[in-house]
Image: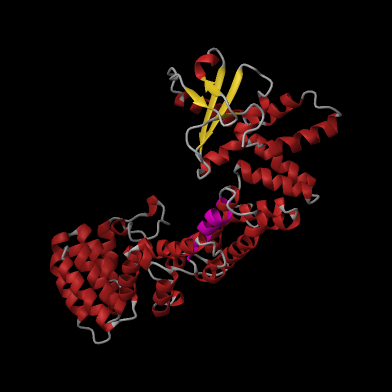
Amino acid sequence: MLRTKALRREMPDIVDESAIIANNVGVFWMNQELKNFPQSRRTIFLPAMRILKAEDPAKMDTILPREIKFITSLPDVTEAELRAVSAAYRELAGNYAKADSINNIIIAKFPDGVTARDKALKAFYTAAPAQKTIVQWKAFIAKFPYEKFKNVNSEEDRMWYDKAFRGVVYEQVGKKNYDILYEMAPVSPFVGLTEFHRLLVLGAESHGEVTLDFIFPYSKLLVEEIEKRTNRKDGNESRIYSESQWKDHLLDYALPAFMGHASLLHRKGDDKTALVWMEKVKSHKGSNSADFMGLYATLLENNGRHNDAMQIVENAVAMNKATPETIALLKKEYIKKNKSDKGFDAYFDSLKSAETLSAQQAHIREQMIRQDAPMFKLEQLKGGSADLAKLKGNIVVLDFWATWCGPCKAALPGMQMAVNKYANDKNVNFFLSPRRKPSPITRRKSNHS
C-alpha cells in the first residue's frame, strides 16, 4: 500500500519515487492477499477499491457494491469498517447521500466514536466565537477524551482539532490567563506545543508584550512537554516510524523551541543549562542556520569548550553563515594568536567557501531588478524626513521587515553586519521600515534592530 501509485495521497510520503509500483501490480498484490488470507477482506477493503478504481474503474463499479454489502452485513462490524464504507461512497462512488446515511448509522451505533466526535468537533470549530469558550471545550473533551482519540486519522481531525485547541488557548491567553498552558500543554497536539512556544513565548517576549522573567516558566513548561513527546510514539502518523526515527522526526520540529528556550536561558545568565538544550538538537535540520551556530558557539565558549566553539565558528564562516557573534569570537581568537587584528579581514575571507559564495552572488545577480527607484519622501521616527532625491549618487539600502516575519528577523544579523561595515561611509545610507507600525521609516548608521 505504501508503494502503490494510486495510494500516494493516502499514505505517508516516506517511499522514494523509484520504489513506487504501478497500479496493476498493486491489484495483483491485493488479490494475492485475499487468496492467501481471506480474513483480510475486511481490512483492505477501502485501499483495494481505491487501487482498483485507478486501474479498472468499470471493474470497481461492479465489485464495490458487493464489497459494501459484505461489510455492512457483518454482525460484528466495527466503526472503522463502516467509516471505510462511508469513504467509499463519497470518494469512489460520488454518492454523498449514501455516505451521509452511513454516517448517521455510525453515530447511532457508536455515539461516542470517531464519527460522532468529528461531527461535534466541526460544530465547535464553526460555531460563533462566543460559543468557542473554555467551558464548551471542556464539555467536548469530557465526552471525547484526548487519550482515546489521539491516534485518530480523519479529515475532520486534521482540519479542525489542532486549530480548535489552539483557539481556546489563545482566547484564554488574550485574557492574560497564561496559566491555561499548565492545564492544556499535557494534552496538546505536538504541533500546538511548538506553536505556543513560537507565538506565546518567543513572539510575545520579543514584541515586548511580556517580560523575560514572566514568560520563562511557560517556556520551560512547553519545551519540557515537547521533549516528553519525543520519547513516546503518539499519533496516527507515528505508526510508520521506528522509535528512533519518530524521535528524530519530532526533534526537527522541536529545534526552534529548544533554541529559543536556550536563548532565554542565555539572557538569564544560565549558559550551562542553555547548552544542554542546544545539544539536544545540534544534529537536526536547522542546526546549520546562522542563528543556531552563533548561539551554539557562544554557549560552547562560555562553558569552557573553546576548541568546539572555534570549530563551529569556522564552519559557520565556511558556509557563509557568520553572525556578528561568531565573527567576534573568530576575531578574538585571531588577535590572541597574532597580537593584533592586522590582516583579519583577509583571514576571514580565506575561510569562506568560494564555491558557495560564488553561487550566492550569482543568485543575487539573477534576482536584481535593475530599475530606477521611485522618488519618495517619508517621515522618520527620530524626526525629519528621508528624501531619496537628495541621496542621488549614494548607495541606499532599504530594508522592509515585520516583527511577525521569521525570515525578516533571521536576516537582521546579516544586515547589522552590513550596517557595521559601512558605519563610517557617508556614501552608504541604510533605512529600515518595520511593519509593527505603518509608514514611518527610521535611518540607522550603526544600529539595526
* Residue 252 in the image, given as x and y percentages of width and height: 54, 55
What is the number of callouts on the image?
Answer: 0
Is 226 situated left or right of 6 in this image? right
Residue at the image point whose x is 55% and y is 12% from the top:
393
Q: Is residue 334 above or below residue 119?
A: above
- Residue positioned most to the front: 383
Which one is in front, 340 or 231?
340
Residue at the image point whose x is 40% and y is 59% from the top:
12
Q: In which quadrant of the rendered view does residue 361 lie?
A: top right
Q: In which quadrant of the rendered view does residue 24 lie?
A: bottom left
User: What range is drawn magenta here?
Assistant: 189-203
* Residue 161 in the image, given as x and y percentages of width and height: 40, 65
Residue at the image point whose x is 70% and y is 58% from the top:
276
- Residue 31 appearing in the image: no
Is 434 situated left or right of 345 in this image? left
* Residue 279 in the image, given as x and y percentages of width and height: 67, 55
Q: Is residue 133 magenta?
A: no
- Residue positioned most to the right: 339
Q: Quadrant of the C terminus?
A: top right
* Residue 399 in the image, given as x and y percentages of width and height: 53, 31
- Residue positioned most to the bottom: 75
The overriding secondary structure of the stretch rendered in magenta is helix
Which one is in front, 291 or 406?
406
The colour scheme is secondary structure
Q: Is residue 11 above or below residue 98?
A: above
Residue at the image point whose x is 67% and y is 53% from the top:
264
Q: In which quadrant of the rendered view does residue 445 lie?
A: top right
- Residue 209 appearing in the image: yes
Which one is in front, 207 or 281?
207
Q: Is residue 193 magenta?
A: yes
Q: Quadrant of the N terminus?
A: bottom left
